[in-house]
Amino acid sequence: MAKVVVLGAGISGHTAASFLKKKLGSKHEVVVVSPSAYYQWIPSNIWVGIGQMSVDQVRFKLEKVYKKWKIEFKQAKALSIHPEGNKDSDKPFVTIEYVVGDRQGKKETVDYDFLVNATGPKLNFEATEGLGPSTGNSVSVCSYDHAAHAWVELQKSIAKMEAGEKQTFLIGTGHAMATCQGAAFEYALNVAFEVKKRKLSHLADIIWITNEYELGDFGMGGAFVKRGGYITPTRVFSESILSEYGIRWIKRAGVNKVEKGLVHYETLAGEYKTQEYDFAMLIPGFAGAGIKGFNKNDEEITDGSLFKPNGFMTVDADYTQKPFEEWRASDWPETYQNPIYDNIFAAGIAFAPPHSISKPMSTPNGTPMFPSPPRTGMPSGVIGKVIALNISRRIKTGSKDYKHKASMARMAAACIVSAGYGIRRGKAATMTVAPIVTDWEKYPQWGRDINSTVGEVGLAGHWIKLFLHYMFIHKAKGYPFWWLLPE
């Protein structure tokens, strides 16, 4: 009997666990370790943040689903990985700490034959002074509880506008290296939509602040999309929709401090500026989950063999340091297997990208300022599934010849950017990018397959996004024929 331990129960971890159990059945053991009792469909958190969905519409308890699937669930956080075992055990194991119940604070070791690191990111609010819900200076939509808090704070600003008081909304990225611009972009559009619906636009100054060199970069170096028979850069695509919604923007900006009512930021040109606000929703930078690694002699091996300095796990990528112009699509991982410990894999945000997709830039003051590569949503699900299929095949056949691969330089991604919630008046921008990572060798003109990279804006996009919300909740809950639904 083989034992597979999955750390994390987000999109990638939950997907990996579900397919592992389906493929391996009762003959093998699957264990999921996650500090949260809930699975959450993160793409819909923005709707919680504007009061159009409740928290319970975007989450459900994991224990019931895992009990049905006969997956062992431990509500705990992973502290360390011991891929060689230690002096007391020849078997590799992870150390975990329970976070709830009678066992809260107690530590335990969990051995494994295969390990999937799908912890996702640490929301690194601490990297920006004063940023985040805990300080009370800004809100977030990165989790369902953050999004619910954002809606509480947003209602306060709406109430002030209804009383005739002007409000400034600052929405975007809260760190010079932040990613997830898409979620913040959606939230800005949805706030503008809700304000307009209440006929309060004349009292709202909505500002999009971003570390992107040009709007529409989204950590992918931007893209060219086919729209209405024309080829349009995502810069024009983004600027047009922001202008349509009455949103002005500040680009090439790295937020470095958030005070009550005042944000401090550095521009790419090296200037230090401030922006006043009444309501701020700023996405933090991401870091690894902070898990440590130890060898047989209990010596720390966190840096290098297991993790990169940012805390994300090393996988089958080419991490050779070289100029941006020399990076290639082939540098990106395909199987997400650690190069030293071949029974360890990293899925979704947990893996370390070999390089940025957007061109690295720094201010004259030496501050790096460019978006980190996005690895959320569809790519996370696909990677989780591919890892599960490869591990299950290896357990069943012993073969290390992995048939399933998922390079982001070959993978297409469909993205639906909500631009307002409403069955009759809602709107969304639908965009397909193929591949996610630009490949200038294969597509020298556009960097991507222009015939598969398309974008449109309209009510139909909102219906599709709403349908996908319920479809993916259905899939994650393991309802009939869940495995037939795409990632």
Image (spheres, rainbow, N blue to C red):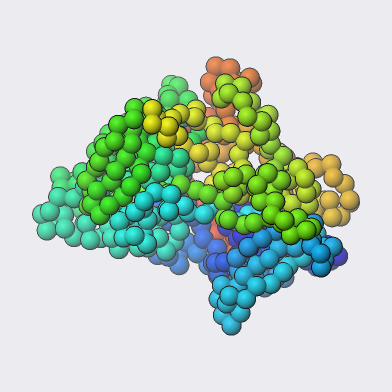
Q: Position of residue 484 (x, y in %)?
A: 67, 52
- Identified at 27% across, 57% down, the residue is 154
Q: Quadrant of residue 482?
A: bottom right
Q: Quadrant of the N terminus?
A: bottom right
Q: Position of residue 92 (x, y in %)?
A: 78, 60
Q: Residue furthest top?
A: 445
In the image, 286 versus 58, the foreground residue is 286
Q: Position of residue 170 (x, y in %)?
A: 28, 46
Image: 413 above or below 299? above
In the image, 321 versus 101, the foreground residue is 321
Q: Residue furthest bottom?
A: 102
| Tally of marks | 0
Q: Position of residue 116 (x, y in %)?
A: 70, 55
Q: Quadrant of residue 215?
A: top left
Residue 50 visible somewhere in the drawing: no
Q: Quadrant of residue 236?
A: top left
- Identified at 82% across, 51% down, the residue is 393
Residue 144 visible somewhere in the drawing: yes
- Identified at 45% across, 29% down, the residue is 361
Left or right: 111, with 381 as reference point:
right
In the image, 265 versus 212, the foreground residue is 265
- Identified at 38% across, 27% down, the residue is 364
Left or right: 297, with 315 as reference point:
right
